[in-house]
Amino acid sequence: MEQTVKNHSEFKAIDMAYIGIGAALIAICSWISIPTTVPFTLQTFAIFLLLGLLGGKKGTLSVLVYILLGAIGLPVFANFSSGMGVLLGNTGGYIIGFLFSGLIYWAITAKSSALWLQIIAFALSLAVCYTFGTAWFMYVYAKSNDPVGLATVLSWCVFPFILPDCVKIALAVLLEKRLRPLLHLQ
């Protein structure tokens, strides 16, 4: 009986370690950045990889920890930025959208992690992130500038990212399949 309790607590410690390492990976990938209106980063790659490796629940928790670290002032966002000002700024909706991406992925893959389902989950979660981030951008931008049209915001914040994000999904899926056996993940 005592051995069962010990193994159960070790499993939780391993989960927490993977979640923390996942948040750190997202931060590192956010620092690899090309500055534009919405910076080109590897954040989405890290999120897709973590969701694939850790599953929806632990992957989403990694994203939440990442966002909370940035919110309290650790420089984990693109260009080593941090704080509530970033989250409440023009591009903060895309960062919050990462959390929705994780939740969507988790909901879709909760019963099965078949490759075709995983790819659909990634595509839908990315679309949700784009949608939330774009709506947020339009709202915040209009408060401090003149209102801007949807087509303009899409041309700034979504269209340039679609192809790179599709490549990130493909790379994340390929890398996840290779790393999973090495990390002994279920």
Image (spheres, rainbow, N blue to C red):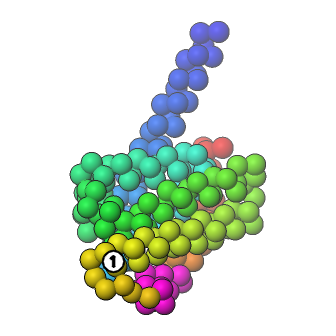
Give the residue at x 58% y 22%. 7
- Where is 85 relative to 126, above or below? above
Q: Check disc 1 and report the residue beneath it.
A: 141
Locate residue 103: give its quadrant: bottom right
Give the residue at x 52% y 37%. 15
- Where is 136 relative to 65, above or below? below
- Where is 57 relative to 79, above or below? above
Give the residue at x 75% y 52%. 112
Locate residue 35: give its quadrant: bottom left
Q: Amino acid at mark 1?
A: Tyr
* Direction from residue 179 to residue 36 in the image, left or right: left
Residue 120 at x, y percent in the picture:
69, 68
* Direction from residue 68 to residue 127 in the image, left or right: right
Locate residue 76: give its quadrant: bottom left
Q: Quadrant of the N terminus?
A: top right
| Residue 113 in view | yes
Q: Main secondary structure of the magenta part?
A: helix
Judge the density around disc 1: few (<14), some (14-19), many (≥20) Cα neighbours within 10 Å: some
Residue 169 at x, y percent in the picture:
57, 70
- Where is 122 relative to 111, above or below? below
Give the residue at x 54% y 45%. 58
| Residue 182 in view | no
Tell me the magenta residue range. 150-163
Residue 155 at x, y percent in the picture:
45, 89
Q: Is residue 161 magenta?
A: yes
